[in-house]
Amino acid sequence: MRCVICFASILPSVNWTNFLSPQKEEKVCQVCREKLEFIDDPGCPRCGRSEGSQVCFDCERWEQSDYQSVLTKNISVCTYNDFAKELVARWKYRGDFTLVEAFTEAAQTKYKNHFNGMEADLVAIPLSKERLRERGFNQSEALITQLGASPERFFKRKGSEKQSKKGRRDRISGENPFELIGRTERPVVLVDDIYTTGMTVRHLAHLLREAGCPAVYSFTLFR
């Protein structure tokens, strides 16, 4: 077995406990695993930020904006550190699609721990046609598939401008770049790779809540 991140060989650990049991296929070597900062005990209970011990300043500001209470909570798997940034660049922009396998088990466990038993629609973040052609896949839909579900497509983009190229102020003051094309009476979990300012998921959550959705959560790999 080889690590899907660095391609180093992974030697299975065999002892008297697991000698007669089928060996679990490891996707990530110990060196790479130690570079990933898993969020086990988030500081902010609303956005999942790892720092701090209470509701963060960003979430307090959201509650004073037009997007107050549209998003119930964000759950993230890992901190968006420098190592994670490189992985996202390889995955999204250099076509290394198999990297998603590095997070499958952790994402499944995290999702189950927080949403187990809740009947919800897992909704993908839409890409523009131009962005989809560039990447060849939608990272949001890929993550939902790794969670063992089929992505719901409730939105489409109005334009092709990247939200990641905008600053926080421009994102908040700008027009909502999404249009709602589907409805549900069940809770929704918006799935994406990164939670940065939280504007994208709040744009989508706002449209869903206006259409009668009872609750909207977001689930991301990185925060």
Image (cartoon, grey):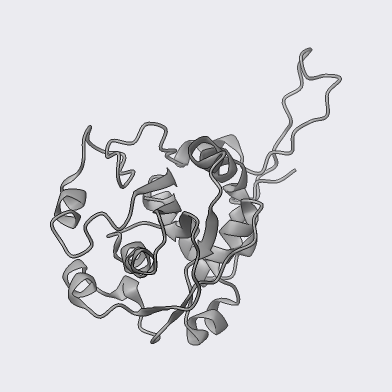
Question: Is residue 32 in view from this perspective?
Answer: no
Quarter the N terminus occupies: top right
The residue lying at 57 percent from left, 35 percent from top is 30
| Position of residue 11 in the picture relative to residue 60 (left or right) | right
Query: Which of the two residues, 17 or 210, is positioned nearer the viewer here?
Result: 210
Query: Which of the two residues, 103 or 32, is positioned nearer the viewer here?
Result: 103
The x and y percentages for residue 152 are 57, 66
The residue lying at 34 percent from left, 36 percent from top is 42
| Position of residue 133 in the picture relative to residue 209 (left or right) | right
The residue lying at 21 percent from left, 50 percent from top is 59
Question: Is residue 208 in view from this perspective?
Answer: yes
Q: Classify 23 as above or below 124.
A: above
Q: Residue furthest right?
A: 20
Query: Which of the two residues, 222 or 11, is positioned nearer the viewer here?
Result: 222
The x and y percentages for residue 189 are 47, 55
Displayed quadrant of residue 150: bottom right
Q: Classify 164 as above or below 100.
A: below
The residue lying at 57 percent from left, 58 percent from top is 143
Query: Which of the two residues, 33 or 31, is positioned nearer the viewer here?
Result: 33
The x and y percentages for residue 211 are 39, 69
